[in-house]
Image (spheres, rainbow, N blue to C red):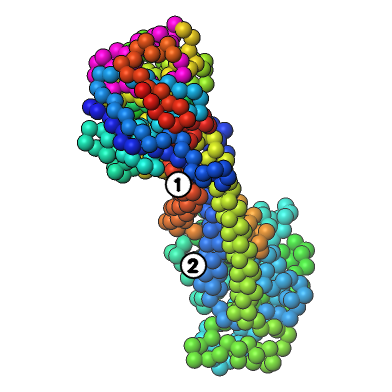
Amino acid sequence: MILRAEKIAKWYYRKSGESNRFFTVSETDIQLESGSLTVLMGRSGSGKTTFLHMLGGLLIPDAGKVWVDDKDLYAMNDAELSRYRNQHIGIISQGHTAVQSLSVLENVMLPQVMYGDKDGGTGLAGEWLTRFGMQDLQEAFPSELSGGELRRMSIARALAGKPEILLADEPTGDLDDENTQLVMKALREAADEGTAVLVVTHESDALDYADQRWQMNAGVLTK
Amino acid sequence: MKFRKLPFRNLTKKPGRTAMLTVLVMILSFAMFAGAATIFSLRNGMKSLEARLGADVIVVPVSAKSKVNLDEMLLQGTVGYFYMDSDVLEKVREIDGVEKASAQTFLATLRADCCSIPVQVIGIDPDTDFTVQPWIAQSYGKPLETYDLIVGSKVGTEIGSTLRIYQQDCQVVGRLDSTGTGMDTAVYTTMDTMHLLLEAAQGLGHDLKITGDPDEVISAVYIKVKDDSSAVSVNNYINVHIRKVESVQTKNMLTTVSDGMAGASSAMTILIGGIWVLTFLLIIAAFCMILRERRLEFAVLRMLGASRRMLSGMIFTETAAICVLGSVLGILLACAVVFPFGGLIEEKLGLPFLQPGAGMCILLAAGTFLGVLLTGTVASMWTANRLSHVDASKILREGN
C-alpha cells in the first residue's frame, strides 16, 4: 500500500501582516510505502502535526490530494473515510487519548470492535500490552495510569489493529529512554512486516530506525 | 467488548453526570404524568357527576341553604340534613313538564357511641328513584330489605359487615363503584329504613328539627324534566308556586364545578408547560456543559475511525437510556403520589376526582414516556451535532 500526498497545503487567514494567507503547510508532496519507516523531524510549531493529520484523513487540505493507492482519501464521504481510517490507518496522537470509560485492554481493542460489533482482537491487544510491560494493567482504567503508561497504551492500540499505514505523532514524547527504544523497535518491526510508518518527532534518536528522513521548517518539507 | 455497549459504559462510569440528567428527566416525567393524570381524573369526575346526577332540578326546603352549602352537600357529599313535608313530592309531580320526580331523605350520623362512623345516610325510593337506583342495581341485583345498606366506594366498611346507626344495626349488602363525587362517601338505604333511623335518632334525643311525623318528611326532590319541556320553566314554577322550598337547577351547580375544573385544569396545564420548558432548558444546559468535557473523547473516537453518524448515535443512545430510566422513575413516582392521594387532591381542589382506568393510565404513561423521550432527544440534538462535528485535528493538537 502506498500513501501519496500530492501538492497538499494548509493555510489560515490572518487579519494583519504582509500577506493575508499564512501557510501552516506549504505545497508538499510525499510518498509513504509499505515496509518503510519515514521519520519527519522539525521544531514545535513547524506544521508536522497538521501535515500528519492531513495524511491521516483527519484534516482536509486546502489544496492538493491524498491518495492511498488509487483512492482519493478526501473524495470519500464521512462514513467511508471513517471506516477506511479505522481499517487501514493507525494514528498515534500527541497527548493522552484514552477513552476514560473503558479499561486499558478495552481501549486497545476499541478500533477493532468499532465496526461489526464482534468480540475480537483481545489476543493481539493483550500481546502488545504485555510487550509494553502493561500486562498487569489491562483491567485498570486510564485515570489510574501515568503519562508514560497512557502513551504506551495508545501505541499498543494503534499497533494491535495491524494497520497498513501507521502515523505516529511524537510517539516517544512522554517516555524514558528504555521505553523509547522499546516503542521505536516496535514501530520498526511493524514497518518490516509491511506497514508504511511515518514518525513525526523532534527527537533525533528516531533517525536510527528510519528508511527515509524528512525535515519540516515553517511548513516547508525538505529531504 | 462491543462498541454498542460504549454509551452504557459512559453512563455507568460517570454516575454523577448520569444521575443529574436522570433526575432532570424524572422531574419532567413526573410533572407530565402527574399533571395529565390529575387533569384526566378531574374530567372523569365531571363526566361521572353529570352522568350520576341525572336530575335537571332539585327541590330542597328553604331552610336548607342556611344549614349547609347545597352545592357541596349535593355534589361533594358534605354531611348535613334538612327536612320538608313529603307532600312537596306530589305537588312537584303534578307540574307540567315533569317527567320523573323522586324524593330522598338525608340523615347525618355522628362520631359517637350510637354510630359506627360519621356518614351521610340517604334514603331513596327504589321504585321511583332515577339518580342512585340505576347504579345500585348494577352493584346489587336484589331489592333492598329493611336495614340493608349500600355503601359508597370510599366508605370504610366491608360488604357483609354491620354498621351501627343510631343504635340500629344495619347490614352492608353492596358497594357502589367509585364515582369521584359525594356519592362515594354516602350510604344508601330505602325510605322505610330511613324512617326507622329518623325515629331512632329522635328517640336518642337528637334534635333533627322535624315538625310532625318522621314518616312524612323528605329532604329533597329530584326532578327529571321532559325532553320537550324547559328545566328553567319548571324551576321557576316551583320557586313561585310551592311554598317553603327552593328549587335549584343542577346545570347551574355543574357550571360552578365545571368552572372550577376548568380553572384547575388550566393551572395544571400551565404548570406542566412551565416545568417542561424549564426542564428542557436545563437538559440543554446540562448537555452544553457536557460538550466541553467530552470534546477530546469524541476527537479520539473520530481518530480511531468513528463516523459522525456513529457519534451522534452514541449521544442519542445515552440520551435514550437516561430518558427511559428517568421517565419510568418519574411515572412510578407520580403513580405513588397521585393515586394513593387522590382523595386528598379531591378534598384540596374541592372538585370531583375520578382516577382514570388502567387502560387510560397505560396510555398516559406511554404518552409521557414518548414525550420525555422526544424532549430528551431534541434537547440533545444540538450537543450530538456539535460533538459529532468536532474538529478532531484541532482538539488533538491542543490536547483538549
Q: Looking at the figure, which quarter contains the C terminus of chain A? A: top left
Residue B205 is inside the magenta segment: no
The CA span between labels 1 and 2 is 59 Å
Please name the residue that numbered disc 2 is placed on.
B135
B267 and B341: which one is in front? Answer: B267
Q: Where is residue B186 in the image (x, y as percent from the top left)?
A: 61, 62
Residue A202 is inside the magenta segment: yes
Q: Magenta residues, as a range?
A: A178-203
Picture quadrant where residue A39 is located: top left
Q: Which sits earlier in the primary sequence, circle 1 or circle 2?
A: 2
Could you tell me which chain the residue with mark 1 belongs to? B
B298 and B319: which one is in front? Answer: B298
For mark 2, give the secondary structure: helix
B269 and A40: which one is in front? Answer: A40
Q: Looking at the figure, which quarter contains the N terminus of chain A? A: top left
Asked whether the viewer can see residue A42, the reply is: yes
